[in-house]
Image: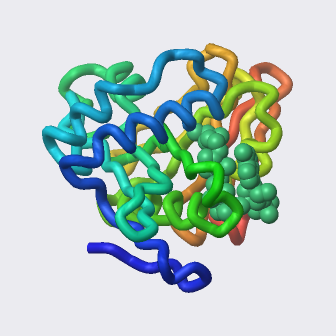
Amino acid sequence: MTSVLSETPDVHIGVASTGDGASIASLGALALAGSGLVQPCPLPLGDAIDQHGGRVPLPYGEGVCHTARVGRSLVGMVYSTPPIRWISSHPEHERPLLVHQLVEIELLAVAEQHRSQGIGTALLEHAEAHARSVGAQFAVAKIRAGAFATMRWYRRRGYRIAAQGEPLLFTTTHGQPSNVSDGNDGHHLAVKPLDSVTVLQRRSPANGPSHLIPVTSSQGDR
Ligand SMILES: CC(C)(COP(=O)(O)OP(=O)(O)OC[C@H]1O[C@@H](n2cnc3c(N)ncnc32)[C@H](O)[C@@H]1OP(=O)(O)O)[C@@H](O)C(=O)NCCC(=O)NCCS
C-alpha cells in the first residue's frame, strides 16, 4: 500500500520492492554519511531488498524499508528494524518476546534535491506507524555526537535526545525491567514514545548516573 504526501502530491510513500536494491544502497550511503559512519554503502541491504523486497528477515523479526518515490525515481528511504543488539543482550528464552518492544530507525535519507519538502518526516512517520501497528512502545535512533542538525531534526519530530551514555530505563510489556543504551560508541540515543500518553523524563539520582524514564503525561511534562 502506498500513500501520497498532501503537500507534495507527486511523492508516494510505500514499502520497497525487489529491484530497488541499488537505489536503496545509494541512499543508505547518504544516511551513513549523515550519521558520521565511514563504512562503505550498505550493499548487503541492497542485496537483501532485491532478494526479499521491503521486508527483510533478520535473526529476530524483520527489517522494514519504506521508500519515497517521485514518478519512477526513488528519492528517499527509511530502514527500521528490531534493535538486534538490545535483543541479543537478553537471555535466549526472552528474546522472542522482545522483538516488537522497540523499533530502531537504522537508516533514513532523502536525496539532496528533494529535501525540505516533508519527505523525511513522512518516511519517519510511516516507520513509526508500522512499529505502532506491531505493538512497539518506543522508536529509537542513534545520532552521532556533534551532529546537532540531525539532533534538532529528531527533536522537532518528538524525540528526546539522551546525553551520551545515558540510557532509557523502561518495563517491557511482559513486565521485565530493561534498559537501552547508545552503545558507548560516540552516539546519542534519540527516543520517542509511540503512544500519545507517555512522555520521557530525565532522572538524575544522587547515587547513580542519570537516565530517561517513561511516565504518563498526567504525571509528566513535555
Ligand atoms: C535528515 C533528512 C532525512 C531530512 O529529510 P527532509 O526530507 O529534508 O526532511 P523534511 O522535509 O521532513 O524536514 C525538513 C527539515 O529538515 C531540515 N534539514 C534539511 N537538510 C538537513 C540535513 N542535511 N540535516 C538535518 N536537517 C536537515 C530542514 O531545515 C527542515 O528543518 P525544520 O523542520 O526544522 O524546518 C535529510 O536531510 C537527509 O537525508 N540527510 C542526510 C542523511 C541523514 O543525516 N540522515 C539522518 C541520520 S540517519
The residue at 64%/49% (across/down) is 112
How many marks are shown on the rendered structure?
0
Query: Which one is in front, 108 or 154?
Result: 108
Which quarter of the picture shows residue 151?
Answer: top right
Q: Quadrant of the N terminus?
A: bottom left
Residue 104 position, x and y percent, is 46, 41
Q: Is residue 197 left or right of residue 3?
A: right
| Residue 46 visible in rendering | yes
Query: Which one is in front, 221 or 108?
Result: 108
The residue at 53%/45% (across/down) is 108
Residue 35 position, x and y percent, is 63, 31
213 to 42, vertically: above or below? below
Q: Is residue 87 left or right of residue 52?
A: right
Residue 145 position, x and y percent, is 75, 25
119 to 143, vertically: above or below? below
| Residue 155 visible in rendering | no
Q: Is residue 27 left or right of residue 168?
A: left
The residue at 34%/59% (across/down) is 135
The residue at 23%/32% (across/down) is 47
Query: Which one is in front, 10 or 4?
Result: 10
Query: Which one is in front, 161 or 27?
Result: 27
Q: How is the image coloured?
A: rainbow
42 to 46, vertically: above or below? above
Which quarter of the picture shows residue 136?
Answer: bottom left
Q: Is residue 13 left or right of residue 165?
A: left
